[in-house]
Image (spheres, rainbow, N blue to C red):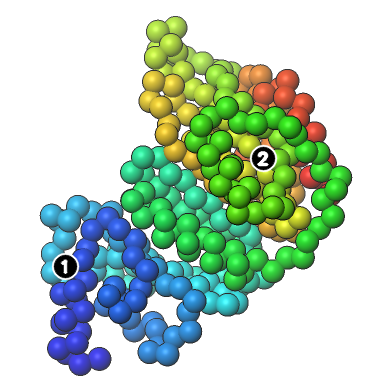
Amino acid sequence: MTVDKYRSEVEQEFSTFGPWVYEINEAYPLPALFAPFFFDDDQAIMKIKIPRDIDRRNAKPGMNLYDYVIALYKDQLRILERNENDTVSEKLVQAADFMGIRIYKNMLRAACTIYSVDGSISFSFNASSIDIIWKFANQVLASLERNKPLDVSSLPVTEAEPKTMLLQNMLQDMRRERSDISMGAVQKAIEVYPREDTTTKIERMLWKELNPEAVHLFTPKELIVLENGFFPNRAGMPDFGFTYTIMPLNKLTAVNISRSNEYSLLMECTIYLGPSHLTYHYDVDNEEVGEFYTALKNL
């Protein structure tokens, strides 16, 4: 790279910097810090760059302004991360090692987590970029999810529907796009009570915690959990967002169901994805969720 071209790309990187995730292309090139890690004929299906969590007014020309570059190929995912000393570390996720993806959004806050046999990597982003993250997630699933369909005829199907308008709309969109989705269980939003509750009655009225409404979906290839927020939600501080998690069925290493040690009147379903795990809570009287995960466990 010539000096003039390098200077031009550094200036362009600064001029377009903001809280947005960009798909890397001619208009939005690789950040200068990450450029040496890619050849000109790179065969990535899609590359995105994740900005540093700083205000535009604190950015200066010549600063390394991006924390991540993530490149998707037909058989692997490259995740390059900027370290504090402006060096770059790299993690490779092979298609056979991919174990799921989670997207969280609440107003302007958002995050994405990628699961693999080696653990998980998470990055936050401004929710104004949610569309490009959806595009990226769909591309990842299409490229890396290699599992064969399973016989899911033993899994129960519920006729219940979520009450939250956000979940209703998201579910309608999912059903329109995919005909193979079934709903195994629904957990309504309920107040939760910590076993060691030190809050006063007034504090509980103002800041009570809620288990978010959730729908537990499945296809012959995947387990999909859609929550209205993130456990625990806070009443009085409405959560207008969602958590969307999709996991290949043949990558679930274990499913454990037990009573919650932290909250009374709640059960816990913990799903293990290699070294990572996700825990979902449900009402002790909700037989539907328990039966669904018991059947999934025996699949």
Q: Is residue 186 visible?
A: yes
Q: Residue at x 40, y 8 (%)?
A: 202
Whole-percent x, y for residue 215 in the image: 63, 37
Whole-percent x, y for residue 72 in the image: 50, 73
Rounded to the nearest angstrom, the CA distance separating label 2 from label 1 is 43 Å
Please indicate whether residue 297 sits to the left or right of residue 117 in the image.
right
Q: Residue at x 27, y 55 (%)?
A: 19
The picture quadrant where one finds residue 222 is bottom right
The picture quadrant where one finds residue 256 is top right
Please indicate whether residue 8 sits to the left or right of residue 124 in the image.
left
Measured along the vertical axis of the image, is residue 207 above or below residue 19? above
Measured along the vertical axis of the image, is residue 178 above or below residue 47? above
Whole-percent x, y for residue 100 in the image: 60, 57
Determine which residue is flagged by label 2.
216
SS class of the residue under badge 1? helix
Q: Is residue 31 visible?
A: no
Determine which residue is flagged by label 1.
15
